[in-house]
Amino acid sequence: MKRFDPIHKENGKWYYWIETWADKNGPFETEEIAKRELKRYCEYLDYGGDPKNRCTCIDEIEGNQCSHCQEMKYKL
């Protein structure tokens, strides 16, 4: 199965697809900003953005990412 990068450029601006791939967030001025915002969005999905609510299934030692990024095989 082919994996797609959730970060993409459209009409000179950068966006990222949300977890359902049905909508995108953006526009962002640079790819780096889009990546940063995707990471923040993934953190929000996993634990509401509050570290005390962080999902315990994330294994920092093994380097696993949030379910959204992990599903898309996207390395932030």
Image: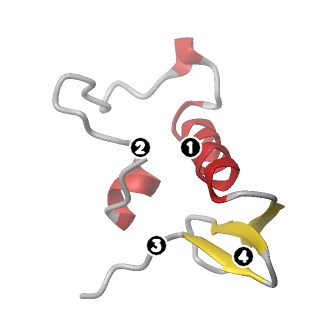
Whichever of labels 3 and 1 marks the residue nearer the N terminus, that label is 3
Compared with 44, 26 (above or below) is below
* Image coordinates for residue 75, horizontal then vertical, percent: 36, 52
Q: Which mark is residue 5?
A: 3
Whichever of labels 4 and 1 marks the residue nearer the N terminus, that label is 4
Compared with 50, 45 (above or below) is below
At x 46%, y 72%, the residue is 5
Q: Residues within 10 Å of mark 2 (few under 14, many from 20)?
A: many
Q: How many marks?
A: 4
Q: Amino acid at mark 3?
A: Asp
Element type where label 3 sits in the image: loop
The residue wearing badge 1 is 39
* Image coordinates for residue 36, horizontal then vertical, percent: 62, 43
At x 24%, y 34%, the residue is 63
Front position among marks 4 and 1: 1
Q: Nearer the viewer, residue 27 or 18?
A: 27
Element type where label 1 sits in the image: helix
The residue wearing badge 4 is 23
State how far apart marks 4 and 2 are (Cα): 19 Å
State how far apart marks 3 and 4 are (Cα): 14 Å
At x 56%, y 36%, the residue is 43
Q: Amino acid at mark 4?
A: Asp
Give left or right: position of 3 versus 21. Answer: left
Q: Quadrant of residue 7?
A: bottom right
State how far apart marks 4 and 1 are (Cα): 16 Å
Residue sitting farthest toward the top: 52
Q: Nearer the viewer, residue 10 or 48?
A: 10
The residue wearing badge 2 is 66
**Could you tell me if the residues under marks 2 and 1 are in contact, i.e. CB atoms within 8 Å?**
no
At x 41%, y 43%, the residue is 66
